[in-house]
Amino acid sequence: MARISGVTLPNDKQIHIALTYVYGIGPKHSATILSEAKVDPTVRVKEMTDAEISRIQDVINANYLVEGELQRVVVGNIKRLKDINSYRGLRHKMNLPSRGQRTKTNARTRRGKKVTVGGTAKKVAAKT
């Protein structure tokens, strides 16, 4: 059971895949980290030595923002956009897409479940 940057990596996966479980490390960065640490990308996590794991951890600590520190930076950037009332900040405040997607249709992920506006039901004729 290897822990890198506070994340427990799955034992049965190859290390180049398992590294992507760390927030902030994707496939490209994973390959770069493994080449800098001189570790074979196809070795399984359970077969790695402590020295290899520590080399990977050293490379990550020296060159990358990951996990909580990266999340703080991202949240800070969004907060700054909201504070200066930029267009993107306003879209974040209103919980709408901020990168130019259409919102007349679609955008359900950001806007939530569809709410039907009242007044569409047929009115019953009143007795006079």
Image (cartoon, rainbow, N blue to C red):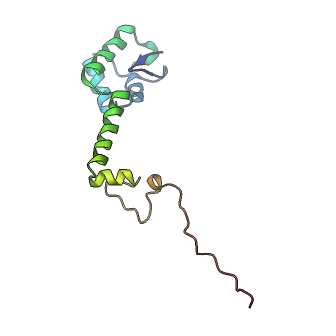
Q: Residue 23: image x %, image y %?
A: 38, 31
Nearer-the-camera pick, 45 or 85: 85
Taking the image as shown, residue 65 lies to the left or right of residue 113, namely left
Q: Residue shown at 31%/13% (left/top)?
A: 55
Q: Quadrant of residue 51?
A: top left
Nearer-the-camera pick, 110 or 14: 110
Q: Quadrant of the image for the C terminus?
A: bottom right
> Is any atom of residue 61 visible in this view?
yes
Taking the image as shown, residue 50 lies to the left or right of residue 34, namely right
> Is any atom of residue 26 visible in this view?
no
Q: Residue shown at 44%/64% (left/top)?
A: 105
Q: Quadrant of residue 9?
A: top left
Q: Residue 114: image x %, image y %?
A: 53, 61
User: In this rendering, is residue 78 above or below 24?
Assistant: below
Total labels drawn: 0
Nearer-the-camera pick, 15 or 43: 15
Q: Quadrant of residue 36?
A: top left
User: In this rendering, is residue 43 above or below 103?
Assistant: above
Outermost bottom residue: 128
Q: Residue 62: image x %, image y %?
A: 25, 19
Taking the image as shown, residue 18 lies to the left or right of residue 70, namely right
Q: Residue 121: image x %, image y %?
A: 63, 75
Outermost right residue: 127
Outermost front residue: 128
